[in-house]
Image: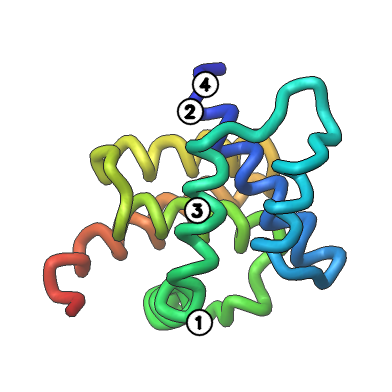
Amino acid sequence: MGARTKSRRRAIDLLFEAEQRQVNATELLKERLATPVTDAPLNEFTANLVTGVVDNWSQINDLLATYSQGWSVERMPAVDRAILRVGAFEVLFGEVPEGVAISEAVAIATELSTDDSPKFVNGLLARLAEVKPTLA
C-alpha cells in the first residue's frame, strides 16, 4: 500500500471515528496530531484531507445527496460516507487526477465495506467528476 493510500485510509478512519463518537473531526484531528495513538503519526496529506472535507462539509454532503439517486447521506453505511466524503473532496478540490481519486476510493471501499459499496462509490464519484465543470 502506497503512502498516499495509507494517508487516505487514515483520513477515512478519522472521519469515521469522529462520526461514531459524535465529536468534531477537526478537534479529533488536532488531538491525534498532538498525541498520536499509533506508531505512525498522522502526516500532512492525511491532515489536509480531513481539513478539506470539514471545510467543504456542506457542499460535499449536498452533492452526495443530490447525485446518490435515492440514497440520503444518512442512509448510507457510515464507512461509505467517510469514503465518499474523502473521495468527493479529492474529485472536486484535490490535486490528483479525478480517476486516481475515484480508483483509490473504490479500492478502499472494496477493502472496508460491503460487496455493493465499490460500485456505488465508483458511480457516485464518477457522477461528481462528470458534473464538476458545471458547479460554481
Q: Which label sits in the foreground, 1 or 2? A: 2
**Is residue 12 depicted above or below 67 in this figure?**
above
Q: Are marks 2 and 4 in contact (CB under 8 Å)?
A: yes
Q: Earlier in the sequence, mark 4 or mark 3?
A: 4
Tell me which amino acid carries mark 2: Arg
Q: Residue furthest top?
A: 1
Mark 1, secondary structure of its residue: loop
Q: Is residue 120 left or right of residue 19?
A: left
Q: Residue at x 71, y 46 (%)?
A: 13
Find disc 4 in the rendering and name its residue.
3
Q: Position of residue 28 (x, y in %)?
A: 75, 57
Q: What is the spatial separation of the Cα atoms under label 3 and label 1, in whole angstroms?
A: 21 Å
Report crowding for label 4: few under 14, some 14 to 19, many 20 or more residues within 10 A (C-alpha).
Answer: few
Height in image: 121 above or below 47? Answer: below
- What residue would you read off at disc 2? 4
Question: How crowded is the residue under tag 1: few (<14 C-alpha within 10 Å), some, or many (20+)?
Answer: few
Q: Amino acid at mark 3?
A: Val
Whether label 4 touches label 3, CB < 8 Å: no
5 to 99, vertically: above or below = above
Q: CA distance from mark 1 to mark 2?
A: 32 Å
**What amino acid is found at the position of numbered circle 4 in the picture?**
Ala
Relative to 49, 25 lies left or right: right
Q: Which residue is mark 1?
A: 70
* Residue at image coords 48%, 54%: 121
The residue singled out by tag 3 in the image is 86
Question: At 83% from the left edge and 64% from the top edge, which residue is drawn?
Answer: 20
Residue 19 lies in what quarter of the image?
Answer: bottom right
CB-based contact (under 8 Å), mark 3 and mark 1? no
CA gap between label 3 and label 2 equals 12 Å
**In the image, which is nearer the foreground, mark 3 or mark 1?**
3
Residues at discs 1 and 2 in contact (Cβ within 8 Å): no
